Image (spheres, rainbow, N blue to C red):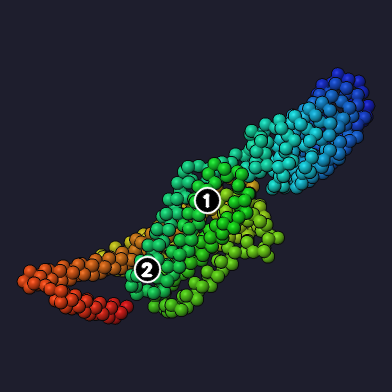
């Protein structure tokens, strides 16, 4: 082993009839000469891995009582029919790390005692239905790291004694429901039983969805009813809130579907991942992420120019701001909708959004799936450029605010400027905490480093949506202006309610006093009711006039 043997003479082992094990690994053998192995009538173990063997046919091996054969790490492109038919006592066959693309019927003919077969790390795209009929006692089968993504259930039906099988993804275990141990058990997010594998993930989906929806709905309602002087900035933040609200809706849909498939996910995972609802969830999450990034960049630019060039800058009109937002929404919608269009099916395939149970296009556990370049541009290039710009802009604004605060004589103004600088610093920190892990893990996955399943799950369920939950707090709910506006709105509603209650109490007291002094007959009841109706209609008209004037 580990020499430079390119060829072995046919008479090399002629006097080794008692040889039990032969190790020829790590050489440069390109073929196996049948005459070399014929004298080895008692050979049980043969190691041929790490050579350059390209062809295995029916005439490759002679009739010898071989029980263990390793052809790992060669260059085998094709296995002929009856390639191992002379090795009828073979129990362990290792064919991993080769270049096989197809398994044809009859390949394992006459291997009735075969117990273990490894075919991992090949390029297998197609497996014929009857290929495993000749190995009825097979107990272990490894099909990891191949090109096929679906396997007909009939392929594994003849393997009634199969105890362990290995696939690339746990979803393929739906083709081997009769096998006791099918690996992998899950991908970190989902497993063979549940769409969301761990209880903590199920809790986080509901919590993050509730926080995202509640906070952004409060922002939308508050900025709609509360008056503001900066109409353009308010318009930006309302669109940002709506963008983040889409992420909350997405999380609620995923949480509901998890309840629907609880305990039986493996049987329905293919139907779910290829369903319209899953594609719609993928569209929603991508639209939310991309539109949020673009609108955040727009908000940052608006603030940046306002702080660094307060006099030279002209505030854009509401129409111009609306046109800019419409353009950004169209761009984000196009990016999110492209993977599910019929025109993009050749490039994206039918699992761009259905690549995982939560319908995200992050593609961490399978970084080079179809459309991986598109996913990399979305989550690496766009997010990185946006993050660099946002960090630069806010750091520049913090320096400007601090520089202006040095010359400020008023202690109160200096404190206000410090608060603004602190808020900007928190915005930069939260954006980094959200985007940097996603960008980093995506780059590591593309570099070929395996990503732990738990990390992938937390990225998808917690880290990616966290910006949508924090944006309402950072940009609206904790700002002094919004607090004052909401306080005024609440006080105004409260005072109107008190005034109405006071008027109602006065009118009821007056009617009681009149009823105590004067006897009220049927006719007088009609007069009082008429006057009450007339007075209330007058009051309503006055109030409506006041409201229209205020608006």
Disc 2, SS: helix
How many discs mark residues in the rendered view?
2
Circle 2 residues within 10 Å: few <14, some 14–19, many ≥20: many
Disc 1, SS: helix
Establish if 395 lies above or below 153: below
Q: Quadrant of the C terminus?
A: bottom left
- The percent coordinates of residue 169 (x first, y second) are 64, 44
Give the residue at x 54% y 46%.
Answer: 261
Tags 1 and 2 in contact by the CB under 8 Å rule?
no
Establish if 536 lies above or below 17: below
Q: Quadrant of the N terminus?
A: top right
Q: Which image quadrant for residue 404?
A: bottom left
Describe residue 450's horizontal placement relative to residue 398 as left or right. right
Give the residue at x 53% y 60%.
Answer: 284
The first of marks 1 and 2 along the sequence is: 2
Identify which residue, 360 or 366, lies in the foreground: 360
Q: CA distance from mark 1 to mark 2?
A: 32 Å
Identify which residue, 429 or 154, lies in the foreground: 154
Q: Which residue is mark 2?
A: 223
Q: Which mark is residue 257?
A: 1
Work out which residue is located at the far top of the displayed protein and give it.
Answer: 18
Query: Which dot, 1 or 2, sits closer to the camera?
Result: 1
- The percent coordinates of residue 387 (x first, y second) are 50, 61
Whether residue 9 can be seen here? yes
């Amino acid at each position: 082993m580990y020499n430079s043997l390119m060829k072995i003479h046919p008479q090399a082992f002629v006097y080794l009839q008692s040889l039990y094990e032969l190790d020829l690994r790590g050489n440069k053998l390109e073929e196996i000469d049948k005459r070399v192995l014929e004298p080895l009538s008692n050979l049980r173990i043969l190691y041929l891995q790490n050579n350059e063997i390209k062809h295995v046919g029916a005439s490759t091996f002679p009739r010898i009582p071989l029980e263990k054969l390793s052809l790992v790490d060669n260059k085998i492109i094709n296995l002929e029919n009856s390639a191992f038919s002379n090795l009828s006592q073979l129990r362990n066959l290792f064919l991993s790390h080769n270049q096989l693309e197809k398994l044809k019927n009859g390949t394992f003919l006459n291997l009735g005692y075969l117990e273990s077969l490894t075919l991992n790390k090949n390029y297998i795209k197609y497996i014929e239905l009857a290929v495993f009929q000749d190995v009825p006692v097979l107990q272990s089968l490894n099909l990891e790291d191949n090109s096929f993504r679906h396997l007909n259930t009939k392929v594994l039906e003849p393997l009634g004694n199969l105890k362990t099988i290995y696939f690339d993804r746990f979803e393929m275990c739906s083709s081997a429901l009769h096998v006791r141990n099918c690996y992998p058990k899950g991908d970190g997010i989902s497993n063979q039983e549940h769409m969301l594998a761990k209880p903590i993930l199920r809790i986080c989906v509901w919590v993050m969805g509730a926080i995202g929806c509640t906070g952004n709905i409060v922002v939308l309602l508050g900025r709609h009813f509360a008056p503001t002087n900066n109409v353009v900035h308010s318009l930006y933040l309302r669109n940002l809130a709506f963008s983040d609200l889409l992420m909350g809706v997405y999380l609620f849909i995923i949480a509901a579907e998890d309840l629907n498939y609880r305990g039986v996910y493996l049987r329905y995972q293919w139907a779910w991942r290829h369903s319209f609802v899953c594609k719609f969830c993928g569209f929603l999450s991508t639209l939310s992420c991309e539109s949020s990034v673009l609108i955040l960049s727009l908000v940052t630019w608006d603030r940046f120019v306002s702080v660094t060039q307060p006099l030279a800058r002209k505030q854009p009109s509401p129409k111009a701001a609306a046109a800019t937002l419409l353009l950004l929404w169209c761009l984000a919608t196009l990016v999110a909708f492209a993977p599910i269009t019929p025109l993009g099916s050749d490039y994206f395939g039918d699992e761009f959004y259905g690549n995982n149970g939560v319908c995200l296009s992050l593609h961490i556990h399978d970084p080079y799936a179809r459309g991986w370049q598109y996913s990399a541009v979305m989550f690496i290039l766009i997010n990185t450029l946006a993050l660099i710009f946002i960090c630069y802009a806010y750091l520049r604004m913090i320096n400007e605010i601090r520089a202006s605060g040095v010359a400020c004589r008023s202690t109160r103004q200096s404190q206000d400027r410090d608060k603004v600088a602190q808020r900007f610093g928190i915005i930069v920190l939260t954006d980094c905490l959200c985007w940097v892990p996603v960008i980093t893990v995506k780059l590591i996955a593309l570099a070929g480093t395996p990503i732990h399943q738990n990390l992938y799950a937390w990225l998808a369920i917690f880290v990616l949506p966290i910006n949508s939950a924090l944006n309402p707090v950072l940009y609206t709910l904790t700002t002094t202006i919004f607090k004052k506006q909401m306080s005024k709105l609440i006080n105004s509603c409260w005072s109107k309610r008190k005034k109405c209650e006071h008027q109602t109490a006065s009118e009821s007291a007056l009617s009681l006093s009149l009823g105590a002094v004067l006897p009220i007959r049927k006719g007088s009841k009609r007069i009082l009711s008429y006057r009450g109706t007339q007075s209330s209609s007058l009051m309503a008209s006055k109030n409506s006039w006041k409201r229209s004037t205020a608006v």
